[in-house]
Image: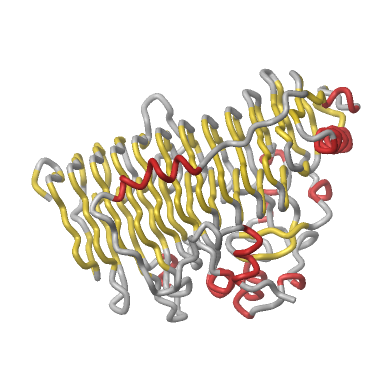
Amino acid sequence: MPLSRRDFASLTGLTTAGVLLTPGISEAAPLDPWCEVPLIKARIRPPTFRRKDFLVTDYGAKGDGVTKNTTAFHHAISACHRAGGGRVVIPAGTFLTGGIRMLSNVELHVAKDATLKFSTDPNDYLPLVLTRWEGTLCYNYQAFIYAFEQHDIAITGPGTIDGDAPSGKWSSWGAGATPELRKMGEDGVPVEQRIMGTGKNLRPNMIQFFRCRNILISDVFIKNPAMWSVHMVFSRNITIRNIEVYSTNSQGDGVDLDSCSYAYVADSRFNTNDDCVVAKSGRDADGRRVGIPTTHVVVERCKFSGRWGGITIGSEMSGGVSKIFARDCVINSPDFPGRYPIKHALYIKTNQDRGGVVDNIHLKNFKGWGVEREILFVSMFYQNGGTKGHFPQINNVTVDGMVIDGGRIAAFFKGFEQSHIRNVTISNSTFANITELNLVEQTDNLVFRNTTINGKPA
């Protein structure tokens, strides 16, 4: 039987957190929304672990870069879990493996000079698992590191996690069976009948934790994912800190928070081939059916260097996104150059296929250089605007203290006649070397306060 919205909410604990959004209802923005940030951060606590190490080499793993260590990793993680938890340690060396399944109370620690390198053979990511692929639930290859309904789990460094995707066939798969899967979601095909995997060519994530809680990812260098790098789904109490992400494949997002609550992303660096830090909540009919938002997210002191949005909302946001706070971040930092420049410091993208409510999105004290396109891009016309008449809402967006030198347009806001963007305040900000005028359509109560564009009041 397909799971209902309430079924998913009860399994993820999001109803008890009080964060389900009613479609069509947006919260009124408080006078100073940032007053809520200390309360959000106080509720996000990284897990702790028993002080006992389980060395993967004690379970037969070899760091020669050739031996496939999937079984050894499984045995080490299982032993750690059965013993009540602790730290599974990957020592110096290059350890090749297929898919890894995380279990509760386990910290996977990639030590200095260690590389956890993943196989490029798709068969190493079988059997199929329940996943959400670009906003639609299905059964597909497991992520390179996957957890399902686990708690108190961590991946820590300072070593490297290498998906090695450019060496395999992943990039040649393109969009694969994406149209087929999206039609299944739109038609309400039961999730258990949405079988992808072999022959469907839908690439797996690097890391995906599905319906998990009490999560830590810290101090690791993540490179060469086949698809999204860190994908949290229906999960809560998430801490991601001091990581670096380098991606070259398309769909190379950094961190995707997908129908998640209470997440903290800090002190991290993103040189990605797509969006950097993203809030999502399901796509179109399938996302509305589940109806679980992403909410209560704080992002601080990150560096964004490519390729699309720094802070991104959508486009899969049909379950709603609210209370996203980002501050003290740097766009296209000279000391952290990316393969491509960031196109948008803020990127909110949706359309009339999605529905859903985006509410209370707040940026503060961003600085940057050389933004390729629109610095603030908020549009309901993503992918030509859609056709299905499920008009989204975007309300209560603030940007304060942003200083950007270089960009095509400072502010691009485009709503529908049937659903205007509402309540936008841009304050205490400076935009220099902007080449085109702002574009503002179907947007109500847009206020520029103490803000200049090319030295003139906005």
Q: Is residue 388 above or below residue 177?
A: below
Q: Is residue 387 left or right of residue 419?
A: right
189 shown above or below 412:
below
Task: Identify which residue is drawn at 34% across, 57% down.
Answer: 360
How many numbered discs, if any?
A: 0
Q: Is residue 219 left or right of residue 350?
A: right
The residue nearer to you, when weighing 210 against 419, is: 210
Residue 212 in the image, given as x and y percentages of width and height: 66, 50
Is residue 119 left or right of 182 when viewed as pictured?
A: right
Q: Is any part of residue 171 visible from this angle?
A: no
Q: Residue at x 45, y 79 (%)?
A: 387
Q: Position of residue 20 (x, y in %)?
A: 50, 65
Residue 102 shown left or right of residue 171 in the figure: right
Quadrant housing residue 40: top left
In the image, 81 versus 209, the foreground residue is: 81
Write the residue at 86% across / 34% down: 79
Q: Position of residue 394 (x, y in %)?
A: 34, 65
Q: Residue at x 24, y 70 (%)?
A: 442
As drawn, which residue projects farthest toward the front? 16
